[in-house]
Amino acid sequence: MYTTKEILFYGAHRILWMLMKFPSLKFRQLILSICGAEIGNVSFMTGVKVIAPWKLSIKDGVTINSNVLLDCRGGLFIGENVMVGYGTSIHSMGHKYSQTGFPTFKKPVEIRAGTIIFSHCYIGPGIVIEKSCTLLPGTFMLRVLTKPFDVYGGNPCVLVRALDIDIDRGPQYNSSPLGF
């Protein structure tokens, strides 16, 4: 049987996810701000799912594309001018699968300024992605291994190309009033 707290928590998340499908960028920002998220000038496309928005912090110039899952239960910080591609999952909570009882653990995720995360990437708990890194489509990142400006890809994640130059990608913000 479920407790009252579990029922309210589940219901609140379902309502939040339904409201995030509303076709207005400003409305989605407002809903997340009411829930306790610290949000700058951010573009949330339709279908973004956010778990525990009160532990979410996003700076200016960020675009979060459609069907992205942001699991903020352990904390999630996204720096300025970041683009998160379609279908990406970012998790700050996981399970210790090798221990009896399958206990959970939480570690904050930090994505620093200027990072580009292409579609269908997975970022696990405790990951820090350094300034202006690029994650290619389908990258599966479970270990912290990034250096600023480098390109990573694959499953498991490996260095694809080292870049020794500072890339100023500028704002990734999409200001379409309809959210697409």
Image (cartoon, rainbow, N blue to C red):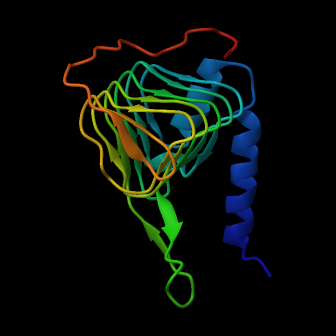
Picture residue at 75% right of the left edge, 66% below the top? 7
For the N terminus, the quadrant is bottom right
**Residue plotted at (55% across, 9% down):** 175
Relative to 160, 51 lies left or right: right
Name the residue nearer the viewer: 30 or 55: 55
Residue at the limit of the structure toward the top, as seen here: 176
Residue closest to the far bottom:
100
Q: Position of residue 177 (x, y in %)?
A: 65, 9
**Depicted 157 relative to depicted 169: above or below:** below
Quarter where residue 16 is shown: top right
x and y percentages locating residue 68 in the rendered image: 62, 38
Question: Residue placed at 75% from the left, 31% from the top?
Answer: 21
Residue 112 as seen in the image, left or right of residue 175: left
Q: How many marks?
A: 0
Nearer-the-camera pick, 33 or 124: 124
Q: Where's the C terminus, which quadrant?
A: top right
Q: On screen, 7 above or below 62? A: below
Q: Quadrant of residue 147?
A: top left
Please provide percent x and percent y for residue 127.
Answer: 37, 52
Image position of 167 (left or right of 153): left
Q: Residue furthest right?
A: 1
Q: Give the residue displayed 51% in from the left and 43% down from the top.
A: 139
